[in-house]
Amino acid sequence: MRRTQLLQELRQMKFEEAYEGWQRGRLTQEEAARLLGVCERSFRRYIRRYEEEGLAGLIDKRLEQVSRLVCYTVAIGGVFGLSAEACCMLGLFP
């Protein structure tokens, strides 16, 4: 399992615990947000997405995007006819 996937799942589990505590009245939104390490506004956004989309709404979509640096490097390598290995050797890949 990749580190990012593990962190996503941990974040989802922590949110479910905080959400349940808030729903049952044991926690305020401020306390639940503090448990998650986010501000109250972010917690309210999480609530809205969770209620609309379930756990899938909590996935950080930034992690699914391809890095712009990688796209740029592949494009430059393609212009000069370089393979991925050659780009690595030249230090073009991170």
Image (cartoon, helix red, strand yellow):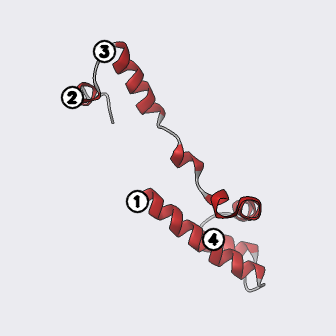
Residues tagged 3 and 2 counted as in contact (Cβ below 8 A)? no
Residue neighbourhood size for the residue with mark 1, other residues' Cα within 10 Å, grouped as few (<14), some (14–19), many (≥20): few
* SS under mark 1: helix
Could you say where residue 24 lies in the image, as x and y percent from the top left? 77, 84
Residue bearing the label numbered 3: 81
- Give the class, few, some or many, for how many residues have Cα within 10 Å of label 3's Cα (few <14, many ≥20): few
Label 2 packing within 10 angstroms: few (<14), some (14-19), many (20+)? few
Helix or strand or loop: what does disc 2 sit on?
helix
- Relative to 1, does residue 19 appear above or below in the rendering? below
**Residue labelled with disc 2:** 89
Q: Residue at x 76, y 64 (%)?
A: 51
3D distance between C-alphas at marks 3 and 2: 14 Å
Give me the C-alpha separation between circle 4 and circle 3: 47 Å
Which residue occupies 78% across, 84% down? 25
The quadrant in which residue 32 appears is: bottom right
Q: Earlier in the sequence, mark 4 or mark 3?
A: 4
Position in image of residue 59 (x %, y %):
59, 56
Q: Nearer the viewer, mark 3 or mark 1?
A: 3
Any mark on residue 3, and which? 1
Q: Earlier in the sequence, mark 2 or mark 4?
A: 4
Residue type, mark 4 in image: Phe
Please give left or right for residue 76 compared with residue 51 in the image.
Answer: left
